[in-house]
Structures are given as C-alpha cells and as structure tokens.
Amino acid sequence: HLEEEIATPEKVKQELINLNVQNVDVVYAQILIESGNFTSNIWKNNNNCSGMKLAKTRATTAIGEQFNHALYKNWRDGLLDIALWQSCYAKNLSQEQYLKVIGEIYAEDENYLTKIRAKL
C-alpha cells in the first residue's frame, strides 16, 4: 500500500460526493466491479479502484503506471482522477447518457453495462 488510511466503502462513496463526481451511484457500481469489491491487485497495489489506465492526453493525478494501469499515491488521488476523467469525457450527463459513454469508451467487457445496472 502506498497510503496507510484504509478506504472503506463508506469513505469511498463520501469522497466521490465530496469531489462532486457525477452519477455517483453508477461510478460506485463501476468501482465495485473494477476493484472486485475492494480486493483486486490493482486496487491494493496501485490505489486504483476504477481500473483506470494511465492518461496520456488529459490532466491526471497518477504518479506513474504499474501492471498496465494508472498508479496513484493514495486512493483519494485515484478517485480524483475519476473526476478529472469525467470533466473531459462525461460532463453534465444524465445517468443514461453516462452509461452510454462508459459503454462506448471506457468498458472493454461487452457485458459491462449489464453488470453496472445490476448494482444500481
């Protein structure tokens, strides 16, 4: 771990709200899927709860790349990067519009949206 503070589901959801992340319920569902309910290697070693790849053309809080995913100093920086991603690619969208965007440009799994909707 790169940071001592433990990220609980409650802290993660509250931080998303504090960061004014849009479509919090969808983003939180993404986090649960991408992090394997906070158990994945990328989550534990990269502080990357969303499976984010290293950004190459937008502002990012990543400090590098590890395991082919963005590496963050701490879990809060990983969440902040979600807000930065949204500001570039998914600003001011309804939930359905947001789901369409993540289905088209974010997800590699063809069943991703079905999995997201099941968690809403």
Image (cartoon, rainbow, N blue to C red):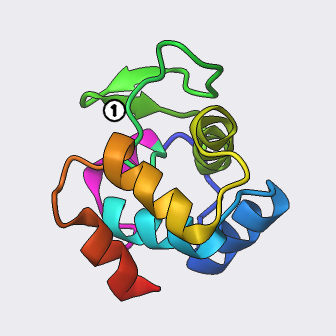
Residue 11, given in percent of the width and then of the height, sits at 69, 71
Which residue carries the number 1 mark? 69
Residue 72, given in percent of the width and then of the height, sits at 54, 34
Residue segment shown in magenta: 35-46
Q: Is residue 38 magenta?
A: yes
Can you say whether 48 is above or below 24 in the image?
above
Q: Amino acid at mark 1?
A: His
Residue 11: tell me if it is visible. Answer: yes
> Which residue occupies the extreme left position in the image?
110
**Where is residue 71, by image quadrant?**
top left
Can you say whether 120 is above or below 57 in the image?
below
Residue 87, given in percent of the width and then of the height, sits at 70, 37
Is residue 109 found left or right of 34 in the rendered image?
left
Is residue 72 found left or right of 107 in the rendered image?
right
Numbered label tally: 1
- Neighbourhood count class around disc 1 (C-alpha, 10 Å): few under 14, some 14–19, many 20 upward: some
Can you say whether 50 is above or below 10 in the image?
above
Is residue 47 found left or right of 37 in the rendered image?
right
Residue visible at 61% across and 25% down in the picture? 60
In the image, 32 versus 71, the foreground residue is: 32
Q: Is residue 22 magenta?
A: no
Residue visible at 78% across and 66% down in the picture? 17
Residue 49: tell me if it is visible. Answer: no
Residue 3, given in percent of the width and then of the height, sits at 60, 45
Residue visible at 33% across and 86% down in the picture? 118
In the image, 72 versus 81, the foreground residue is: 81
**Where is residue 95, by image quadrant?**
bottom right
Residue visible at 41% across and 40% down in the picture? 52
The local secondary structure at tag 1 comes to strand
